Image (cartoon, grey):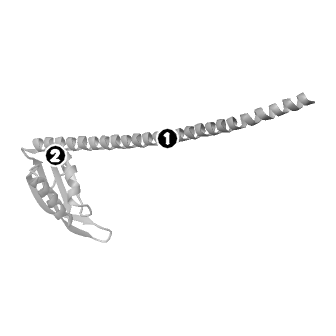
Amino acid sequence: MATTQEHPARLLISSSRKPISYVPAAKRLLQEHGEVHLSALGVACSSMVTVAEILKARKLAEVKKLGTMLEMLEDEARARQKPKMEILLAKSAEFDSLMAAEKDAAAEAAAAKAAKIEAEKAAKVAKEAKKAAAAAAAAEAKEGEEAAEAKEEAAETKEEGAEEAPAVEEAAAVEEAAAADA
């Protein structure tokens, strides 16, 4: 499967990343181009086979071509051969319906998540409103207590004033009598 030009839907697989991390990119390439060309060198070949098997197990792709070869790598010191493997996968017959179902499931999950967030916001607003109402009621009760205390003080002052009034009247009468005697 050695090609002189690069395949437009080529996906180079590395051994440093987990195979499952290549699946979304492979699905996107399958959707855009109808096929994906997986390529790997050396120990990454097993990761590439895993990616291909995941796509096949999910019924998203079918193997179109499979090729193995030795590729010459030229390092600073000497040239050496590395095993290379390539797999060409094509879209399966069920690919479009599976992707549509996956898209619908993702949309439903997003809607459920948005509804949950909105419900949490509404609960938070209701909780804050309840707190504010409780604080207002407490403030109103405190104002009511202060008003009652003020009324009590006014009543006490009035009573004291009423007790002092006869004494003031007596003092005025005594002064008048003293003035009349003089």
* Residue at the limit of the structure toward the top, as seen here: 180
- On the picture, is 161 further left or further right than 20? right
Image position of 140 with respect to 39: above or below: above
> Is label 2 in contact with label 1 (beta carbons under 8 Å)?
no
Pointer 2 residue:
30
- Label 1: state its secondary structure: helix
Query: Residue 16, can we see it?
Result: yes
Does label 2 or label 1 sit earlier along the sequence? 2
Residue drawn at (85%, 29%), measured in percent from left and top? 176
Q: Residue 130: x percent and y percent? A: 39, 41
The image shows residue 2 at horizontal and vertical percentages of 15, 55
In which quarter of the view is residue 105 placed? top left
Q: Mark 1 points at which residue?
A: 141
Label 2 or label 1, whichever lies nearer to me, is: 1
Kind of residue indicated by mark 1 = Ala
Q: In the picture provided, is 62 more to the left or to the right than 135?
A: left
Q: Mark 2: few, some, or many residues within 10 Å (few <14, many ≥20)? A: many
**Is 98 on the left or on the right of 119, as rendered?**
left
Marks 2 and 1 sit apart, C-alpha to C-alpha, by: 70 Å
Look at 80% across and 35% down and name the residue there.
171
* Quadrant showing the N terminus: bottom left
